[in-house]
Amino acid sequence: MIKNTKNFLIPLLISIFALLSIQAEEIKLDIVGKSIRPTIVALKRFTPEASPKIIKPNELESIIEKDLNISRYFESQKYSDILRLLDESDKKKGKIDFYEWKSAGTEVLVEGTYEYKDNIITIKIHVYDVGSAKEIFGKVYKGGDTEYQLIAHTISNDIVYYLTGNKGIALTKIVFISTRDGHSEIYVMDFNGENQRRLTSNKSLKATPCFGTNNTEIYFTSDIEYNFDLYGVKISGGNPWLILRFPGPNLSPNYSSVSQKMALSLGKDGNVEIYTMERNGKNLTRLTYDKAIDQSPSWSPNGKEIVFTSDRTGTPQIYIMNADGFHQRRITFQGSFNDSSTWSPKGDLIAFVSRSAGIFDIYTTNTEGLDWKRLTINQRKNEDPCFSPDGQHIAFSSNRTGKYQIYIMDIDGRNQRQLTFDGENTSPNWSGFYE
């Protein structure tokens, strides 16, 4: 976000084997505008075919249930006494009593088995449409003895895909900045906040991290060499490398996998302007020429346009321009402070931060600047929005608990979930899909 001069530079970062695929009558999701009526799914308790050894009871089911609940498309039924009795009854009968499951409100039923043998985990899944009493799909998943969580996330993604036609986000990641170790460092975590790990350890200030090429690289700003330069680091770890160094700030990188270019803000010409370049810093092209501050660029999903912030009218506002810098136009006209815009993966929405009565909240608008929707309401400061790759969620930072933490929410503002708890955590950026 554009700050005053003093605060401007402070950082706000298995293999799968198919068993069969029988397409039954598809469950139809009730989607009205941005509201989704979730499909009710029940997971039977998975049956171990051999000693599980490394898998806790019900752990696989728990991971899948949590993933599906976050997805917006599904609502998992709690494994109550009723579901337990239905599960036990099916085992005695040797078949599924779809009528009874339907009576219990279940729309999709998942059952599975697993075994651990020769350091290989094998998980077999069958997913049923309860209404038609037909199997939607079945698969066998295999992986190493430490990969059962990865397999569970893959199962969640497959359920989402087979029933909605959309990719699941259970294998995606979020990069962010954390001070939990006493200084600013780059961290990465799973989409649900699990498996948080540090990528940098040089005790310098960090700002504006983003995912880069193939979701395997992170680009960020740091004062490692006493100037705010642009660096990269592999998500797998290793030492950061210098990408770009010009006098003044080198900020706000945003990478387009379509154009394979990075948009960023540079202060090398005396004021902060927006440029594009290749990931290695080559073919630098200046897009804005204004005495004002132009910063925080975000690519459109087709790589043809860029949304950005400029205070050329006296206050920070949101603008859009073509990828070559032409046809710059302002899209926000209400409010005296609008910043940190980011483009949705579907290209229909822009999320941004707006200040009202001294409170920073997150909004969405269409690409014409119309149809504003306020997603956070008077919960102290809410900043740094970014979309999930399926466009159904937004990650952001908020100091509602007293310290800045990373949260995610549905694109209608519902189901706000806190992901980080240690130190101050800011500047989230969501990866694309991992193929």
Image (cartoon, helix red, strand yellow):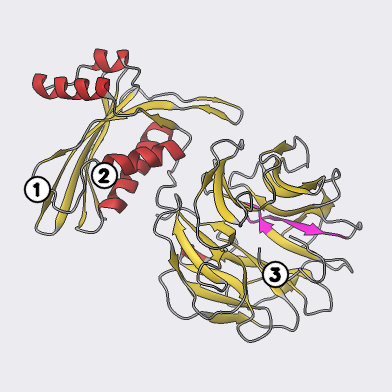
Q: Residues within 10 Å of mark 1 (few under 14, many from 20)?
A: few
Given residues 426 and 311, the one toward you in this image is 426
Q: Earlier in the sequence, mark 3 or mark 1?
A: 3
Q: Earlier in the sequence, mark 2 or mark 3?
A: 3
Q: Is residue 302 magenta?
A: yes
Range of the magenta residues? 298-311
Q: Is 23 situated above or below 268? A: above
Q: Return the x and y of residue 239 as percentages of the image width and height.
A: 47, 81
User: At 83% across and 56% down in the image, what residue appears?
Assistant: 316
Q: Is 250 situated above or below 326? A: below
Q: Which residue is mark 2?
A: 59
Q: Secondary structure at mark 3?
A: loop
- Measured in 3D between alpha carbons, the distance from the residue under mark 3 to the one under mark 1, in whole angstroms, is 53 Å
- The amino acid beneath tag 3 is Ile
Left or right placement of residue 397 versus residue 37 in this view:
right
Q: Is residue 120 magenta?
A: no
Q: Which residue is mark 3?
A: 10
Q: Earlier in the sequence, mark 1 or mark 2?
A: 1
- The amino acid beneath tag 2 is Glu
- Measured in 3D between alpha carbons, the distance from the residue under mark 2 to the one under mark 3, in whole angstroms, is 41 Å
Q: Secondary structure at mark 2?
A: helix
Q: Secondary structure at mark 1?
A: loop
